[in-house]
Amino acid sequence: MLFESLDKLKRNSIMTAILLMALGAVIIICPNEHLGMLLLAGGYTLVIFAIVMMLNFLSGKNP
């Protein structure tokens, strides 16, 4: 059980790192004219992600 939790934590850490690298590459490549829209979309994504995490916590399906 402990090893399964560690494997899930490791998998989540790797996926987070990949997503952050992809976001960094997009920000580097993206011209300044589109940066505001990218930040707005990122903000909405973070809010939706936080709501989903909160609902998962309240429903008892914690990782």
Image: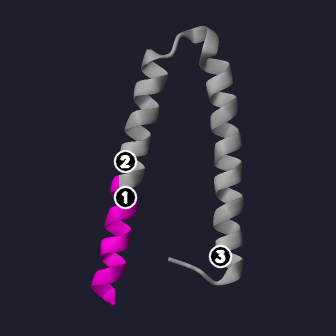
Tell me the CA gap for discs 2 and 3: 23 Å
> How many other residues sit within 10 Å of disc 2, few (<14), some (14-19) or many (≥20)?
few
**Is residue 58 toward the left or the right of residue 22 in the image?**
right
Q: Kindly state the secondary structure of the residue where label 3 is placed.
A: helix
Of the numbered discs in the image, which one, if any, rests on residue 57? 3
Label 1–label 3 contact, CB within 8 A: no
- For disc 2, the marked residue is 17
* Up-down relation of residue 60 to residue 29 (above or below): below
Name the amino acid type tagged 2: Ala
Question: How many numbered dots are placed on residues in this image?
Answer: 3
**Mark 1: which amino acid?**
Ser
Crowd tier of the residue under label 1, counting other residues whose Cα lies within 10 Å: few below 14, some 14–19, many 20 or above: few
| Quarter of the figure that contains the N terminus | bottom left
Q: Could you tell me which residue is drawn at 63 percent across and 65 percent down?
A: 53
47 with respect to 20 (left or right): right
Residue 4 image offset from top left, x and y in percent: 32, 82
Location of residue 40 in the rendering, given as x and y in whole percent from the top left corner: 70, 30
> Which numbered circle lies on residue 36?
none
Please state the extent of the stretch shown in magenta in the rendering.
1-14
Q: x and y percent of residue 62 in the render? A: 56, 79
Q: Which mark is residue 13?
A: 1
Q: Which residue is pictured at 43% across the width and 19% down the height? A: 28
Residue 5: x, y in percent? 36, 80
- Residue 13 in the magenta stretch? The answer is yes
Pointer 1 or 3: first along the chain:
1
Above/below status of 16 relative to 62: above
Label 1: state its secondary structure. Answer: helix
